[in-house]
Structure formats: structure tokens, C-alpha cells
Image: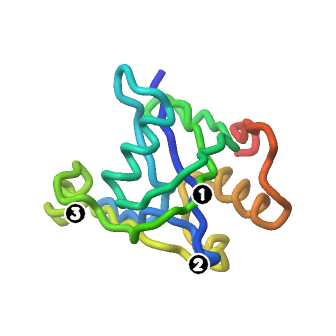
Amino acid sequence: MRRAARAIIIKDNKLLVTRRDKFGMQYYILVGGGVDFGESLEQALFRELDEETGVTVRNPRLVFIEEAGEIYGTQHIYLCEYVDGEPMLRSDSLEAQISAMGKNLYEPMWLPLADLATVTFRSPALQRAILHAVNNGWPEKPIDITASH
């Protein structure tokens, strides 16, 4: 089963996300992606952040786990402390190459937390978990949010 690492990064009441326009379907996702062979979850997290945003973080803490189905696998979602950088695809990243073709776009950006509840987000369970944690505090131990679909 595939594994992925994703980051929750909040700066100035904004959440770092990737806005997707995938052949006309528009939605938002957390930055992150699949774990390569021989890579730890945290190594994958830092690599994906570098490729997809250039944003630097520290102190990743696993807060949510979600079984996202056969195609996407197990999502490990880390709360990270923002250090610096502004979101921009690295020019040699796969996402930048795909975006350059024009029909499947990746746009890393800061989304105001106030707007999170109103956007189409993959996954709705993760969207609800983030909103709950922002308002009530982050879990001390990782929570499996799969059952809350």
C-alpha cells in the first residue's frame, strides 16, 4: 500500500495549500506526496515541501492519519512549524512540468484559515479535522480520521 506525507503549515492565520485545477476540477490539497523507496515519512515530507513550495519548516509532528483508498494509500499528516519561504513550485519539479502543459495545474499558496470551510478540499474529513484542531487545539497523539468520512 502506498504511503504519503503531507504538511499542515500555518503562518499569519493562513494555511499552506496547493490549489489544483485538474482538467477543470478545482480543489485544494495539503502540500505533500508519496514516499519514495528507502525514504522515511519525514524525509518524504521535507523533499515534497522543497519541490512543491520551497517553504522551510521544522519540528514536524504527526497529528492525523487517513486511509485515502487504494490509489492514494495511507496519508500521514504532520503539523509543522513554519520557518521561512514563500510558496513556489521548484522549476524542475514534476508538478511544475505538469503545470506547464496547461490542463493540470498546481499552485502553492497561502489560504486564509477563514476561507478553509468554504473551499472544495481533498479530503473533507481532513478539512473538518484541521478546522476542529485550529479551534480546539491539535491532538497530542495522532488521530485516525478515516472513520470520519
Question: Nearer the observer, disc 3 or disc 2?
Answer: 2
Residue most extreme to the right: 136
Label number found at residue 103: 3
Position of 43 compared to 98: left or right?
A: right
Which amino acid is tagged 1?
Glu
Up-down: is 66 above or below 51?
A: above
Q: Which residue is mark 2?
A: 112
Which residue: 36% across, 60% down?
Answer: 53
Image marks 3 and 1: residues in contact by CB distance under 8 Å: no
Q: Quadrant of the C terminus?
A: top right
Q: Earlier in the sequence, mark 3 or mark 1?
A: 1
Which amino acid is tagged 3?
Lys
Q: Determine the CA span between mark 3 and mark 1.
A: 33 Å
Question: What kind of element bears circle 1?
Answer: strand
| Residue 63 location (% of width, % of height) | 70, 44
Question: What kind of element bears circle 2?
Answer: strand
Question: Nearer the observer, disc 1 or disc 2?
Answer: 1
Q: Earlier in the sequence, mark 3 or mark 2?
A: 3
Question: Nearer the observer, disc 3 or disc 1?
Answer: 1
Question: What kind of element bears circle 3?
Answer: loop
| Residue 65 location (% of width, % of height) | 65, 37
| Residue 13 location (% of width, % of height) | 64, 76
Asked whether 113 or 119 is in front, the reply is 113
| Residue 24 location (% of width, % of height) | 33, 66
Q: Which residue is mark 1?
A: 81
Q: Could you classify mark 3 by the number of other residues whose Cα lies within 10 Å: few (under 14), some (14-19), or many (20 or more)?
A: few
Image marks 1 and 2: residues in contact by CB distance under 8 Å: no
Up-down: is 87 above or below 81?
A: below
Which residue: 46% across, 54% down?
Answer: 31
